Amino acid sequence: MKEAVDSVIGWEVRSRHVRAASSIGLVFGLLFAAFNMLTPGLMALGLAEGLAELLLVVPALILSRSPRYVGLAESLLLLSAGVIFGALIVFGGIEGTGLYWVYVVPFLAFFLKGERQGWMFSVAFLLVAAAYFLLGGPTLAWAYHYTPVTGSHFVLSLLFYTLVAAAFNHVRSRYEAQLAQGKDEAEAASLAKSRFLAAASHDLRQPAHAMGMFVARLGQLSHDAVTRELVVGVNASVRALQEMLDAFFDYSRLDAPSMQVSLADFPVNQLLDQLRTSFEAMAEGKGLRLRIRPSSIWLRSDPVLLHRVLLNLVSNAVQHTHQGTVLVTCRPACGHTQARLEVWDSGVGIAPEHHASVFQEFFQVDNPQRDRAKGMGLGLSLVERACRLLNHPVTLRSAVGCGTRFGVLVPMAAALPAMQRRRGPRTNADLSGLQVLLIEDDVLGGVAMAGLLQSWGCRVVVAVDAASACALARQSPDVDVVVSDYRLPGPANGILAIGQLRDLLGRPLPACVISGDMDASAHQQAQAAGLTWLQKPVRPAKLRSVLRHAAQASAVKSLMV
């Protein structure tokens, strides 16, 4: 992959060099050709220059636009220089100012062809010029007559400028090699940083996740006024830490050299359902109306990256809207070849002068004091960078006091699958009596999660790996939902463990996977398996919303039976 990118970059650089040299040579060459044809005694020189420009320089300019022919374009350009400057020698141009133009040949050869071929062309031109003077070329009846001293001075001067051009090229090549080495070292350091962040992501998210579960459980207990104030402060600090971890690792992942876009066709409702699960409780807690309109549209994009884009847009909308509505829609656009995903809010709005700045790193309109409780200011920067990576244009319409509307233009799937997802009826369901199988090998995280689930009225059994989970399922097959960590001991991860449980129980068991990993492929595997993916540290409200939807699914199934 890297070699292919370097090859494309190399071709673009060579192409720019040839186009620049050809354009300059074409303009000045035609001017000199016209001037010489109008000057008495220089008609032959002018014709030679004009023909070289039309037959060699013009084709070089055209061919340089294709990577297949850029090498040929370089050779044509050098050949035109040899013809034009050879004509200058033959027709007396080096007796005047044309002498200085001939010295351009070795510099142009090294500039276009590099050290090895530059030497070959420059030495060949020098030998031809020397042979012309030594073998009596200037004595020909139709050629310009030079004195032996003039010819000798010219050959020695051309040799000197050839050596100067070679020296300049050597210095340039040395600095280019140093720059290439520095670039390789920077890429290696960036790759090492990405690997470190991938490992640190899981290790840092794990205690933050457990801490969030413990604090949520602590908040459900009765306290005196002073202790309650402390619990509220700790909870706010944990939330801020979790949000910063999310922003930091998501932003770092976009910088990773291994970051690749994985395009797929998928229903937009897949993303909309996830957004509803993520923000329903948060919006309800603020007294907001969260309206996410279902759509039958299928998209062509990277579902993981696009989900992160929408997640940040809806999070900002809920955060900066104090009353009213947050609306998420998906409508056809551009003649039904594109779909426009829009996030509307009735919040504080953004002044027009800040519309460009809000996509910059760490920029926050209403946070000049850098209050970390209001986040790090990376959300919209992540949106802009992810959409640039996906080639999905982002639009913003907003004014102070008039709310905000973000739009993302996404290609629609070329052909819709025959069977599309349909939304079933929604029923009210709580978590009382919900049988949860929790698969978690981290002792601290397992205790925190189990305690929180039990405080919500769930019946919880805990397993540490796929094998023990299957053993528990055989003993108690009436499991309603599985909550599993992604990384588990043994050969099976959380996704495979849930697959084994579904095969064992013979039904599409509702389940979610919790992970601190940054691996996008794991997220895609979970989506392909129909699993909800929760990124550590998981907010308790979000987990509860996922379980509530699982309980609703169980209730609907019972009604159908």
Image (tube, rainbow, N blue to C red):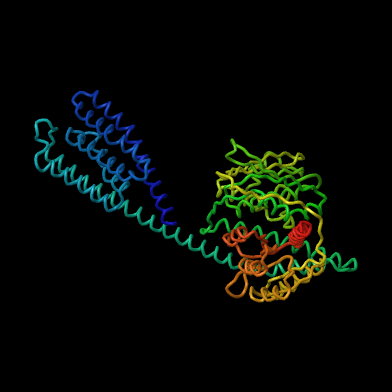
Q: Nearer the viewer, residue 371 or 430?
A: 430
Q: How many marks?
A: 0
Whether residue 262 is visible: yes
Relative horizontal placement of residue 421, taking residue 401 as reference (left or right): left
Q: Quadrant of the C terminus?
A: bottom right
Residue drawn at x 20%, y 26% as measured from the top left: 43
- x then y, percent, for residue 23: 35, 36
- x then y, percent, for residue 268: 64, 48
Q: In which quarter of the image is residue 144?
A: top left
Residue placed furthest toward the right = 224
Q: Quadrant of residue 28?
A: top left
Q: Nearer the viewer, residue 555 or 396?
A: 555
Residue drawn at x 68%, y 45% as measured from the top left: 295
Q: Quadrant of the N terminus?
A: bottom left
Q: Quadrant of residue 460?
A: bottom right
Residue drawn at x 53%, y 55% as measured from the top left: 260
Q: Nearer the viewer, residue 385 or 36?
A: 385
Q: Which of 232 and 525 is in front in this view?
A: 525
Whether residue 239 is visible: no
Position above or below: 33 against 4 = above
Relative horizontal placement of residue 319, taking residue 382 as reference (left or right): right
- x then y, percent, for residue 547: 75, 61
Position above or below: 9 against 401 = below
Residue placed furthest toward the front = 561
Relative horizontal placement of residue 106, taking residue 347 as reference (left or right): left
Position above or below: 368 against 231 = above
- x then y, percent, for residue 528: 60, 58
